[in-house]
Image: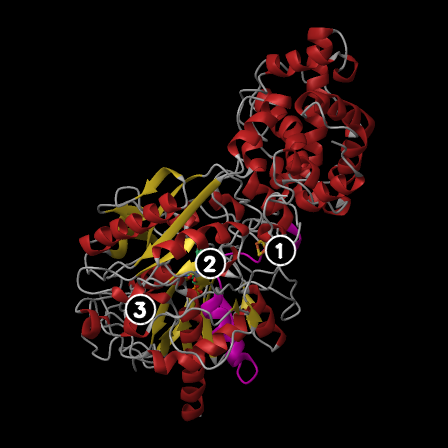
Amino acid sequence: MSGAESVGDERSAPDGVDRTPVTDADVCVVGAGPAGALVADRLAGEREVVVLDAGPRFDPEDRLARQERAIRPFYDRPDVWGVGGERDAHENAGDRSYPLNHARVKGVGGSTLHWQGMVMRLHEDDFDSASERGVGADWPVDYADLRPYYAEAERELGVAGASDNPYAPPREEPHPMPAFQPSYSDSLFAEACESLGIDMHSVPNARNSEPYDDRSPCVGYGTCQPVCPSGAKYDATVHVERAEAAGATVIDRAPVERLEHDGDDRVAAAVYATPDGERHRQEADAFVVAAGGVETPRLLLLSASDRYPDGLANGSGHVGEFFMDHLFAGAGGTLDEETRQNHVGFYTSACDQFYDEADESQAPFKLEFFNYAGPSPVESALTGDDWGDALRDRLRDEYGNHVAMGALVEQLPDADSRVTLADDRTDDRGNPVPRIEWTVGDRALDTIERANAIQVEVLEELGADVEWVAGPDATGPAYHHMGTTRMSDDPDRGVVDADCRTHDLENCWIASSSVFPTSGAMNPTLTIAALALRVGDDVAGWLADES
Amino acid sequence: MELTRRDAAAALAALGASGGVALGARFAADRGERPEEDGSRDGDDVPADDEAVRETLTAVASVVYPSEVAGVSEFVEGFLAGRLDGSAHATGVRETVAELNHLANTWHGAPVADLDSADRDRLLREVGADTAEEDPGGTTAERVRYYVVNELLLALYASPTGGELVGIENPQGHPGGAESYQRGPQ
Ligand SMILES: Cc1cc2nc3c(=O)[nH]c(=O)nc-3n(C[C@H](O)[C@H](O)[C@H](O)COP(=O)(O)OP(=O)(O)OC[C@H]3O[C@@H](n4cnc5c(N)ncnc54)[C@H](O)[C@@H]3O)c2cc1C
Ligand code: SF4
């Protein structure tokens, strides 16, 4: 089907699908992003699993039309995967506005449909931030506890990587696929970095550098974020399909509106809505909430009852608090030579050298060397009031010699940075929308400046005219929602325990970056995947003990 | 620079086409909003047939494509063969082409394909397609920008030959492999 505006209307079209509850379900998973999909796949062979997702199933045939949306100026990023409108309404309060609908996708596959697919392990000290760096909160688990799950997560997602990074945490085995080769612009950066004593190394990508898992290798469409038409970039439809093949039931367009509990501090049912205007109750023995870092706390808060007036699993009062994201720091400019940008939509080199310098006043951060600096000619061609030779000349002028670097910086957990329920704004189903108060502390802002200083130094060594710097005033979020149902051994200090099971409800787990007590500066999804696999094992063990 | 069949195929690979006639009905409904009437339509335009679309787009391409591009009519034909499927998009292209030809007839006394190059350029600017931002459900200017001008620019600059004209042989939208990013300037 051609044409960006021809993308199917999965959100509102009637489709005759049966969305009634599954009888005798062992496990109900809320959310079909990577966290929910991995849990479901883990359990589906042995157990009756049902997955409920608020968003639709997207037709794979529409991916090229979605790519056209990514390129055409008429469409905004959230339009690519149909995010927005009353269903996804939210409120912002606090110092900084948070662009929530640019930062997620609702539907089967979740936000990985849109993500970039950079997948690193957290560093050992990220799990011990309070003890090692004197700030933040320690996780009740260590790198060593997660290490085998990290390896498994890398196999599940299909990660292309190499062992050339001296700053990465220890690993026993190579990545499942070889790393992508460095880009031409990486080679330009390499010279500058070498003379400054800055180490560059490869970066792990959840993207096929060779055929893997019956999926194509990367073919260079260059629109990875927000859509990979070839399927080379991992997205969670992989595990949804696998779970379904193993017998799981996946119900789309089924937003869970509340979790109901019984008198024994167990979740009894997930109450969900369907497009025909009906409401259903999905009962199960165990529940796994995997609705992302904003909708997960929202659902717990929406599930308040007489017994739990502050929301479900909220005995600690911390549900929704400690909302964190990674902060972007960047700089870019132009060289007087060609730099060959925008052939692919991912980066191939990074620098983790400064990461573990982190202490009380400096946050961990990592540096990225972009392969997509400056304008993409096809996108520029569609804006502007020129055509013919004049347009060609402008495109030639604009394209060709840009370079840029990015960085991600940790922000500390702060109880005032939080997700609550809006007082008087409701969504399309009449439920209070999430209200985000996002605050960023000085340690992160100072570290952004430190990252900028290194970036500018590298660019100047390269001989670039530095044309922009995204510093503390221009920073923005990397779209990683973390911290809102934090993990702690102490029921007064956290929402879930070290196994990601809620302290208050025996049969309810949370699989999400919402459990991260401190975030580190690495993109979160490999850690989400590792935790999800671990949740799968814990749920399996619990169910076995129960029966 | 010569556009080839490979470019047309590449443009299609980038933009998608599946000859989805059967699926067309499914999308008829999402074209609910008709554009605001801006006085320039008289409501009589029948959607253009394939031949008229090809002729008109080829004529417009001669204005909006750089002068050194050769093989335009084969390129446009090859690329439209996939785009004129049963989709809402195809309908939008046909309707907008009919509208543009109606204006060409009214203002310049001939359909776009029969105007000389200067008049085609003038017509597009009179319509406002140069300064309009594309919008498939917008004013005539915005729709001409979306369905005609940008349709053609997208096809060209997402193809290897179009990309090469401006220095990138593997432009966004074109699956040109995972090697070109590693290569230095030739
Ligand atoms: C532009 C962008 C780029 C990114 N790049 C990277 C990257 O390079 N590396 C990285 O590690 N991470 C990246 N991320 C983040 C990554 O996408 C997320 O960390 C990951 O998808 C989170 O997985 P999840 O399963 O917890 O949540 P999600 O993927 O968000 O999935 C949650 C699912 O739950 C569903 N849901 C929500 N509420 C309900 C409800 N009440 N009832 C039923 N279902 C519900 C939603 O519809 C959704 O499908 C990026 C994100 C974006 C937006
Ligand atoms: S560059 Fe590779 S991963 Fe990115 S969209 Fe293209 S094929 Fe997919």
Cβ at disc 2 under 8 Å from ligand 1: no
Residue of label 1: B178
CA–CA distance in space, label 1 to label 3: 35 Å
Disc 1 under 8 Å from ligand 2? The reply is: yes
Residue A508 in the image: above or below residue A113: below
Query: Which of the chains bears the disc numbered 3?
Result: A
Highlighted magenta segment, given as a residue range: A34-62
Chain under disc 2? A
User: SS for tag 1?
Assistant: loop
Count residues near mark 2 (Cα–Cα under 10 Å), then give few for <14, some for 14-19, many for 20+.
many
Q: Is residue A264 left or right of residue B155?
A: left
Please tell me in which quarter of the rendered image ligand 1 is found: bottom left
Residue A64 in sight in this render: yes
Q: Amino acid at mark 2?
A: Ser
Q: Position of residue A175 (x, y in %)?
A: 52, 73
Tell me residue B13's x, y (percent).
Answer: 71, 46
**Residue A53 at what x, y percent from top left?**
49, 62
Q: State which quadrant residue B159 falls in.
A: top right
* Residue at the image point whose x is 50% and y is 73% from the top: A154
